[in-house]
Amino acid sequence: MRKILILLAVFLFFAQNFLSAAGTGETGAKVDPKDKYVSVMAYWGGDEEAGFREVLKAFTAKTGIPYIYEGNRDMGTLLNLRIASGDPPDIAMTSSPGTMARYAKEGVIKALDGSDPILPKDILDKNYSQAWIDLGTVDGKFYGLTVKCNSKSTFWYKPASFRALGVSPPDTFAGLLKIADKYLAAGKTPYSIGGGSTWTLTDWFENIYVRVAGPEKYLKLFVTHEVKWTDPSVVKAFGYFKEIVYPENKLAGGVEGTLSTGFIDGFDVILRKNPGAEMYFEGGFMSSFAEQNFPQLVGGKDYSFFAFPEIDPKWGKPVVGGGDLAIVFEDRPNVRELIRFLASKEANTIWATAKKGAVVSPNKNVPLNVYPVLKGLEAAQVTQAKSFVFDGSDLSPSAIGGDAMRIALQNFITDPGKLDSILKTLEAAAERAYK
């Protein structure tokens, strides 16, 4: 069986290199001996790949070191096969801190710190806040450099609507609820929720839970299941969510409308000429849909966002989101050059301003004025975050984050009075999924 896996890995390796333009990144280029180039594997294609290639081409122009880029949407499978065959890429990108941690514990990736560091501490400290260093750390050693990220802790509103109501963006959850009450008193609906796209409901719960219980318990709930879904901290978080969804006159379309509206349509509800609601919660990426669907509106002026409000002052406003981490399989001089370049202000500014596939960078030295207004606000949020946690449903087994959790949240919106049985059912699913 192992021989078959190795042969398959070798076949996929050569096939992928042929398809993804090896060597210096150009079709038909000759591949240099291994000690003269650096290889990178990622799942990016299209505009995402185009943006990253701008960074790689700048690296080659700066250092003279050619690169091989291998893009594959099923990268996880290919990477595992390459590891099994003893031929991993020099650097790979992963969107899963759990995968990084597993590789670190298995000893198949290199710690970037140490007595002879691949990525010196002064470079890391100069460019990244402690939240991003912590995210890439496993058992006290640093393994993963976050190269791009996004925030799911952005609460969308319309500045003119807030001014008319006589309110400002709230710092606390209690302040948010007061704004909702003022909207109700004015005959307006406070919230739109695109609950037909059920993952939006998990984003709601994750932002509430990390503010109620803190990042450590958050990881114990979603990653290790040391915290059960029947835990008092979970019950408490659902209590805060109930303040949003009950009674249903707080929601555009009530319960039925909430559970049948997709995430893009949910945002459209607050932006259209005759809005069905005044506020919408979802990630920073929603600005792209607003630009497409409402080109006459100006981001940062007609619509903007505030950080998901604080619940417990002890935890403040952690950022929930996603991102991609660079992990290193081979320690060679050229690999060191690239990982250090990827950590630099220069590389991250190139990526943040790419013609296609521009990203929000966690590098705190990328000038905020290089971004469009809303991307700049999102970049400020993530670079200044004191705590960053990955999307919990993505950290969980798919049977939980992709199924049971979403069903539980839908059922809760339908009937909050059944919370006890909802959580018992969710916990039973978790006990099976985490075995």
Image (cartoon, rainbow, N blue to C red):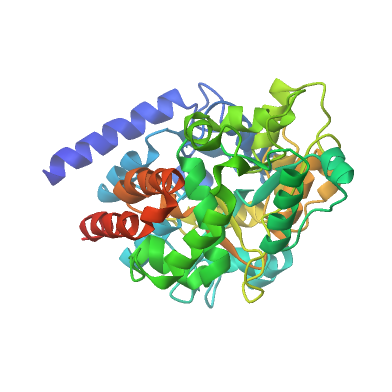
Q: Position of residue 299 (x, y in %)?
A: 80, 34
Q: How many numbered marks appear?
A: 0
On screen, residue 120 above or below 18: below
On screen, residue 223 above or below 293: below
Residue lying at the far left in this picture: please name it.
1
Q: Position of residue 350 (x, y in %)?
A: 73, 41
Q: Please state if 397 lies on the left or on the right of 117 as rendered.
A: left
Residue drawn 46% across the image and 35% down it: 70
Q: Is residue 282 visible?
A: no
Residue drawn 54% across the image and 71% down it: 113
Q: Quadrant of residue 333?
A: bottom right
Quadrant in which the N terminus appears: top left
Q: Depth check: 364 or 321 in front?
A: 321
Residue drawn 82% across the image and 26% down it: 297
Residue drawn 52% across the image and 35% down it: 258
Q: Position of residue 377 (x, y in %)?
A: 77, 48
On screen, residue 392 above or below 279: below
Q: Depth check: 187 or 373 in front?
A: 187
Q: Position of residue 53 (x, y in %)?
A: 61, 34
Q: Please state if 79 lies on the left or on the right of 318 as rendered.
A: left
Q: Depth check: 71 or 356 in front?
A: 356
Q: Please state if 16 lies on the left or on the right of 357 as rendered.
A: left
Q: Is residue 122 visible?
A: yes
Quadrant in which the C terminus appears: bottom left
Q: Please state if 173 lies on the left or on the right of 229 as rendered.
A: right
Q: Quadrant of residue 433?
A: bottom left
